[in-house]
Structures are given as C-alpha cells and as structure tokens.
Image (cartoon, helix red, strand yellow):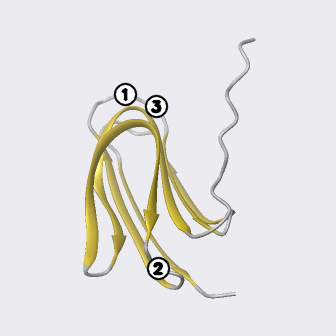
Amino acid sequence: PTPQPTVIIPESGVWVKVRYEGNYSGRVGTSGDMKIVNASGEQFYQLPIVEGIVEATIQKQDGSGKVLTVEVYQNGVMVARSTKATPFANVDLRTEVKKG
C-alpha cells in the first residue's frame, strides 16, 4: 500500500477542514462573516475568532458516492464533524467554540 501523507492539524486557532476528492463549493465562517470557497481535495480555512458560532455549508459539485467531510478544529482538537456520501450532497455544520 502507498503511505498516505500525514496532515498536520494546526495547533492554535479555529479552523474548518473540508475534504473531498472532487470539486466542492460553499461557505465557511461565522455569522455575518462567511467566506465563499470553491476547491477540491483537502483544504483548511482559518477563522479569525477564539469563540463563537462556526458555520459551514459545503456542497459536492458532482454525482459521485465519494465522502465529503467537514470538520471544525479548535487549538488542534476536533470539536465537530459531519460527512455525507450521497451524490450532490450538502453538508451543513454549525457548532459553538468557546475560549479555554
């Protein structure tokens, strides 16, 4: 088997990680400060907050059955995760991060 590269999770800050083998689009951010994203593969999006509500709405742009994964990390720890594999799936993730 081919070894997979190790992904380093950022140790500080609040990040949204999106992973999908195909193309995806959507928005990540906080209420009132959402950023439009269009990408593929594995991407990290840093949010300029230390606490608050994190939101992500990501949609697959194809009809494959591959898994779309959206995760929220705070200071290197996963605090929320959502996945979908259905064609043209939409993942809506909303979670609160707190200081400390």
Q: Is residue 34 above or below residue 60?
A: below
Report the disc number at residue 64. 1
Sooner in the amino-acid sequence: mark 1 or mark 2:
2
Please identify the quarter of the rendering in which residue 47 is found.
bottom left
Residue 22 x/y as whole percent: 37, 30
Q: Mark 2 points at which residue?
A: 49
Gap between marks 3 and 2, in whole Å?
Answer: 31 Å
- Please, what secondary structure does the residue beneath circle 2 have? loop
Pointers 3 and 1 in contact (C-beta within 8 Å): yes
Nearer the observer: mark 3 or 2; the answer is 2
User: Label 3: how many residues lie within 10 Å, few (<14), some (14-19) or many (20+)?
Assistant: some
Nearer the observer: mark 1 or 2; the answer is 2
**Which amino acid type is shown beneath numbered disc 1?**
Ser
- Residue at left offset 51%, top offset 50%: 83
Pointers 3 and 2 in contact (C-beta within 8 Å): no
**Which amino acid type is shown beneath numbered disc 2?**
Ile
Q: Name the residue under label 3.
A: 66
**Which amino acid type is shown beneath numbered disc 3?**
Lys
